[in-house]
Amino acid sequence: MSVRSTRFAAAVLLSGSAALAFAQAYPNRAVTMIVPFPPGASSDSMTRLVAQKFTENTGQNMVVDNRPGGGGATGAVATKNATPDGYTLMMINLGSHAANTVLVDKLPYDPIRDFKPVSQTWVFPSVLAIPAGSPAKSVADLVALAKSKPGGLNYASQGVGSGGHILGAMFKSSTGAPMVHVPFKGAAPAVVDLMAGRVDYLFSAYASVSAQVKDGRLRLLATTASSRLGPLPEVPTMAEAGFRDVDLDTWFGVAGPVGMPDALVQRMQIEIEKSVRSPDVVAKMADQGVQAVSSSSAAFGALIARDIERLRALVKELGAKGD
């Protein structure tokens, strides 16, 4: 039986009263959560917080399955092809389900048609990180360095379409300085090359670089937050540094393959919200500059659609496609 036929059969099986009964019993076995980045990234650590709480709340394991590659495409295709029974989910994000649509030619999945959103889970601003040995002491210094150095600076990102990619393109456009995009398969390998000085800067979640900042291997020049972050009161915002237009929050959320019955999605949303909104999870995320959030399936789907159009206009303005 083909994948399409299997998914159709599952959807039929879960129709009507059968879907309601199935949803009420959910989950009755382990749930796989696909994360489209390697271990060590902020998305991985935040997902594991939620997965642990989900397991505590439901008595069923939530297994984190890291599927890096293609700026989220590898994990997205695996989720798209899964049976729509609620036992294979994906931690989607701004890059995989909005930016990729306008940045990647021949994307092997459709963020709207191939997925059923469940709930948003968290949102965060980014930090501008540089190697500890960089001569730049401020954002202005970094721009001056880019303009003075033959060939300019190289900026890392978590992959094409990631928040780091978009913010890097914004920064390049805002400064007019020569800057070259170097995409990686997630934040963890980008941070390794940043510490080694093989790339010059990176916009990322604070959670992805906090350990390296605390032990002195990286330094922070600014954050993209609207006001100074609680865990980083000494770090100015990009607006304070004179770059108000370099502003983009990155969101994450849970989705599954299209075809999941509404009753099941509503049941899943309740469990995800309980996990994300748990006081200890909220506090741990806040310590990393991350805001825990939740939403209905419809509200999350509307956010995805809005951001696809917003980023389409932004990418056109920045000329970032293929950067």
Image (spheres, helix red, strand yellow):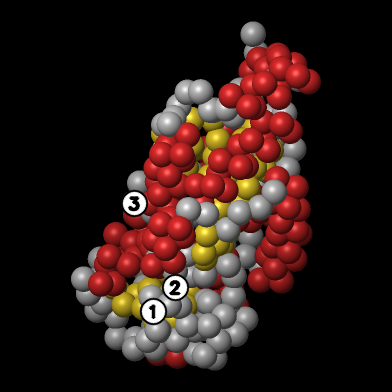
Question: Which residue appears at 70% of the width and 45% of the height?
Answer: 297
Question: Which residue appears at 45% of the width and 90% of the height?
Answer: 140
Marked residue nearer the N-terminal end (1 or 2) = 2
Residue type (three-letter) at the residue carrying disc 2: Val
- Is residue 147 shown to the viewer in this render? no
Give the residue number, with chain letter if any, for mark 2: 127
User: Which disc is residue 232 wearing?
Assistant: 1
Of helix, strand and loop, which one carries label 1? loop
Q: Is residue 180 left or right of residue 100?
A: left
Q: Is residue 304 left or right of residue 48?
A: right
Q: Quadrant of residue 245?
A: bottom right
Marked residue nearer the N-terminal end (1 or 3) = 3
Mark 1 vs mark 2, CA separation in Å? 10 Å
Residue type (three-letter) at the residue carrying disc 3: Gly
Residue type (three-letter) at the residue carrying disc 1: Leu
CB under 8 Å between callouts 1 and 2?
yes
- Is residue 294 shown to the viewer in this render? yes
Quick check: 196 above or below 70? below
Find residue 57 and report its horizontal and vertical position in percent. 46, 39
